[in-house]
């Protein structure tokens, strides 16, 4: 047996690297397929829309007018307006199927100090996000 040949021989290096690469590829593929099978990929892509709303309180009439100031166009069916005391009178009365910049809606039965929220519901199911809020003056 020649020790010099044994130390300089590198025939086994290539198969070992090949096996390591195959295991890594298999693990990555399993993770990607598992993510889509469990539906996690759909939930990641659905984040709350970016939109700006203004609130104009008229406390002598117990009303608030909510105006979409800018940002993404929203689906009316995905937007709700709620207060601390539940849904105000006229809740969800934005006209049309979409809410775009410049659209406004007036809600009644607003109490002093009540916080009004514009809430977006994820169409993929489950989650809700408050995208705007304001508190009525005291």
Image (cartoon, rainbow, N blue to C red):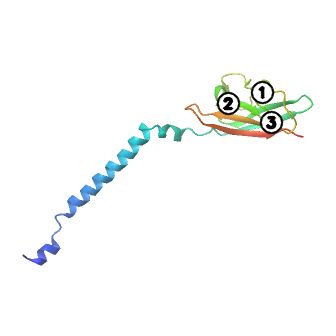
Q: How crowded is mark 1: few (under 14 residues within 10 Å), some or many (20 or more)?
A: some
The reply to whether callout 1 and callout 3 are in contact (CB within 8 Å) is no
Q: Name the residue under label 2.
A: 79
Of labels 1 and 3, earlier in sequence is: 3
The secondary structure type at the circle numbered 3 is: strand
Cα gap from disc 3 to disc 2, whole angstroms:
15 Å
Question: Where 55 falls versus 2 (above or below)?
Answer: above
Of the two numbered discs 1 and 2 in the rendering, the one whose residue sits closer to the viewer: 2
**Which of the two labelled residues, at mark 3 and mark 2, occupies the earlier sequence position?**
3
Mark 1, secondary structure of its residue: strand
The residue located at (56%, 38%) in the rendering is: 46
Cα–Cα gap, marks 1 and 2: 12 Å
Q: What is the distance, in whole Å, between disc 1 and disc 3 at their CAs?
A: 10 Å
Q: Quadrant of residue 129?
A: top right
Of the numbered discs in the image, which one, if any, rests on residue 105? 1
The residue under label 3 is 55
Name the secondary structure under disc 2.
Answer: strand
At a point 79% along the width and 28% down the height, the residue shown is 88
Q: Which residue is drawn at 32% across and 50% down?
A: 25
Q: Earlier in the sequence, mark 1 or mark 2?
A: 2
- Between 99 and 118, the one nearer to me in the picture: 118
Q: Are marks 3 and 2 in contact (CB under 8 Å)?
A: no
Residue 134, given in percent of the width and then of the height, sits at: 79, 40
Residue at 69 percent across and 39 percent down: it is 131
**Mark 2 and mark 1 in contact (Cβ < 8 Å)?**
no
């Amino acid at each position: 047996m020649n020790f010099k040949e044994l130390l300089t021989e590198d025939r086994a290096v290539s198969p070992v690297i090949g096996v390591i690469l195959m295991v890594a590829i298999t693990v990555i593929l399993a993770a990607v397929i598992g993510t889509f099978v469990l539906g996690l990929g759909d939930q990641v892509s659905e984040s709350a829309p970016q939109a700006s709303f203004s609130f104009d309180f008229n406390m002598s009439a117990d009303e608030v007018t909510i105006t979409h100031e800018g940002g993404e166009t929203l689906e009316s069916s995905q937007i709700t307006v709620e207060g601390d005391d539940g849904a105000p009178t006229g809740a969800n009365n934005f006209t049309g199927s979409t809410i775009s910049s410049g659209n406004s809606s007036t809600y009644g039965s607003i109490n002093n100090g009540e916080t009004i929220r514009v809430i977006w519901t994820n169409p993929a199911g489950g989650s809700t996000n408050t995208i705007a809020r304001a508190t009525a003056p005291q």
